Image (cartoon, grey):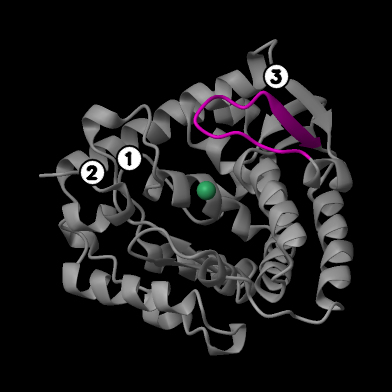
């Protein structure tokens, strides 16, 4: 069967194909809607947890254990505490219903299955409502080391633990509101860079060490070690304007990374930037 990375749901038994098709169509349609008309509930799919295979649980468990060898010392404390709160473990693929019950007690964030990539505005609409759209498939065993598209290991292991932290939770919702509001291409590009250098590939100073918190680093053995150990990485102190002015490159290990002093620093910088954006009148989307 031909592989189609944009429609990973076709190949997984845990996804109901009809439900996924309708959800993807709803997400694609939302790309052209004003924010007030975007209905994120139409883009969600059911996690049919009982259909995960032994191999799925094994892959999850193997990667969880393997990554924790580094992360127990070099993962942000905020990540580790979040992973404990949402009860991630090496025994089984997490159930989103249980993850959400735990998250809800701390920040009100929740995670919801979606069929695959969402258009940017749909993605931001989730974040603005403290909801995180997550892929629910598990990468195949023969591609455990690297998968270009997100799966539940990138999305739930990599991203969701931070959502249990009130400060990061506020940052990410504020980001979502600002990104949903603006159609200014300059802000859109700057916000994409900010997301890349924080949520995806962020580093943070903790306990006199540099530690990992971005999902691309948390969920990837190669990228996680390269980020901390390579002499070729330029690790710069986080500074909002500089981050937003830095272009990023995909498809190879990151040569530039930014290091936070704290998540309060990130939240406060985002709140200020969002105030600027939200006080500008929303313009019509550009074609
Ligand atoms: Fe991600």
Q: Is mark 3 within 8 Å of ligand 1?
A: no
In three-dimensional space, the C-alpha distance between marks 3 and 1, rounded to whole angstroms, equals: 29 Å
Task: Give coordinates of residue 150: x percent, y percent.
Answer: 41, 47
> Of label 3 and label 1, which has the lower sequence position?
1
Task: Give coordinates of residue 114: x percent, y percent.
Answer: 37, 66
Residue at 76%, 34% in the rendered image: 258
Q: Is mark 2 within 8 Å of ligand 1?
A: no
Farthest top residue in view: 231
Q: Mark 1 — residue?
A: 60
Residue at 88%, 69% in the rendered image: 276
In front of the other: 197 or 45? 197
Q: Mark 2 — residue?
A: 56
In terms of secondary structure, what is the magenta stretch mainly? loop
Q: Is residue 13 left or right of residue 171?
A: left
Q: Is residue 18 above or below residue 203?
A: below
Which mark identifies residue 166?
none
Q: Is mark 1 within 8 Å of ligand 1?
A: no
């Amino acid at each position: 069967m031909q592989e189609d990375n944009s429609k990973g749901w076709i190949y997984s038994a845990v996804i109901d194909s009809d439900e996924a098709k309708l959800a993807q169509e709803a997400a694609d349609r939302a790309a052209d809607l004003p924010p007030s008309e975007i209905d994120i509930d139409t883009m969600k799919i059911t996690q049919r947890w009982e259909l995960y295979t032994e191999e799925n649980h094994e892959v999850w468990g193997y990667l969880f254990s393997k990554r924790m060898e580094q992360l127990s010392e070099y993962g942000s404390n905020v990540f580790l505490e979040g992973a404990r709160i949402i009860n991630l473990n090496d025994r089984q693929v997490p159930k989103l219903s249980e993850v959400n019950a735990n998250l809800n007690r701390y920040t009100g964030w929740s995670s919801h299955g979606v069929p695959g990539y969402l258009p940017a505005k749909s993605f931001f609409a989730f974040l603005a409502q403290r909801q995180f759209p997550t892929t629910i498939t598990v990468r195949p065993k023969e591609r455990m080391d690297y998968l270009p598209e997100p799966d539940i290991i990138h999305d739930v292991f990599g991203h969701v633990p931070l959502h249990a932290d009130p400060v990061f939770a506020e940052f990410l919702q504020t980001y979502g509101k600002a990104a949903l509001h603006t159609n200014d291409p300059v802000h859109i590009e700057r916000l994409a860079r900010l997301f890349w250098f924080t949520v995806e590939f962020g580093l943070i100073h903790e306990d006199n060490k540099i530690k990992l918190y971005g999902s691309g680093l948390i969920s990837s053995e190669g990228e996680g070690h390269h980020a901390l150990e390579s002499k070729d990485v330029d690790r710069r102190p986080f500074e909002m304007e500089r981050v937003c002015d830095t272009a990023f490159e995909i498809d190879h290990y990151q040569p530039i990374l930014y290091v936070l002093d704290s998540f309060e620093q990130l939240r406060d910088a985002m709140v200020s930037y969002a105030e600027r954006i939200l006080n500008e009148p929303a313009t019509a989307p550009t074609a």
